[in-house]
Image: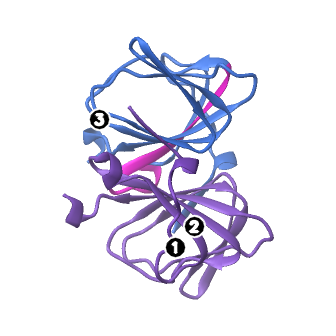
Chain colours: A blue, B purple
Amino acid sequence: MKKIGIEDMKASHPDGTEGVDFRPLIAKNVNAPNFYLRVFDVAPGGHTPGHAHRWEHEMYVVKGKGKVVLGSREVQIKEGDALLIEPDEDHMFVNSSDALLRLICVIPKPDADR
Amino acid sequence: MKKIGIEDMKASHPDGTEGVDFRPLIAKNVNAPNFYLRVFDVAPGGHTPGHAHRWEHEMYVVKGKGKVVLGSREVQIKEGDALLIEPDEDHMFVNSSDALLRLICVIPKPDADR
């Protein structure tokens, strides 16, 4: 078993994010075989980039609340919600609250890492 | 996007668990394409079965603390820890605390569902 505490990994701030601390806790660092588990900490007012891609996201809201912008549709999310973003679906996560929004986001292992 | 709130799914209690509420939030129910995201709520004193299998687990401790028993080795876990259980590795999760232990556990989509 490999254990990676959130406090053990320095956050990065991917292009297109605003107010986001990103930590790919289970990924290439531990030779994850099939999928990667990453944590996004979104500060109040922060957001991820609006984009779409051919792979799905499976997500879980660990803390806080906010919304997902899916093209012209907005969906409120809160602690305890699980989300399946379908392949090719536009999505942007926004922290519209005044407290931290912490999200788990799981993706298939990128082809580049296979 | 599909959203499944933890409060929207009735828990089950899989064989071999003790004091565990199990909710496969993203799985066959939403035709998840590649992997399944499940939540285990382990009550104080509760545990999952001790077993091994050919697929990995990627896990995240959402709330609480406890331990993983890996054969003769024990590892303490707490909120914010991510865990990679390797294929064929023995593992059992135990809530040795006096508060709820909530775990996310992601597995590859079972062959039976492909």
Do circles 3 and 2 both sit on a common chain? Answer: no
Q: Secondary structure at mark 2?
A: strand
| Residue B114 makes an appearance in the image | yes
Across and down, in percent, residue A99 comes to 75, 28
Q: Nearer the viewer, residue B63 or A82?
A: A82
Q: Are marks 2 and 1 in contact (CB under 8 Å)?
A: yes
Q: Amino acid at mark 1?
A: His
Crowd rating for badge 3 (residues with CA inside 10 Å; few <14, some 14–19, many 20+): some
Across and down, in percent, residue A22 comes to 56, 33
Residue that protrudes farthest toward the right in the picture: B98
Q: Nearer the viewer, residue B38 or A27?
A: B38
Q: CA distance from mark 3 to mark 2?
A: 30 Å
> Which range is magenta?
A28-44
* Total numbered badges shown on the rendered structure: 3
Q: Which chain is home to disc 2?
A: B
Q: Residue at x 32, y 33 (%)?
A: A86
Give me the disc on residue A78. none
Q: Secondary structure at mark 1?
A: loop
Q: Amino acid at mark 2?
A: Asp
Q: Disc 3 designates what residue?
A: A55
Give me the disc on residue B21. 2
Give me the disc on residue B13. 1
Q: Nearer the viewer, residue A7 or A49?
A: A49
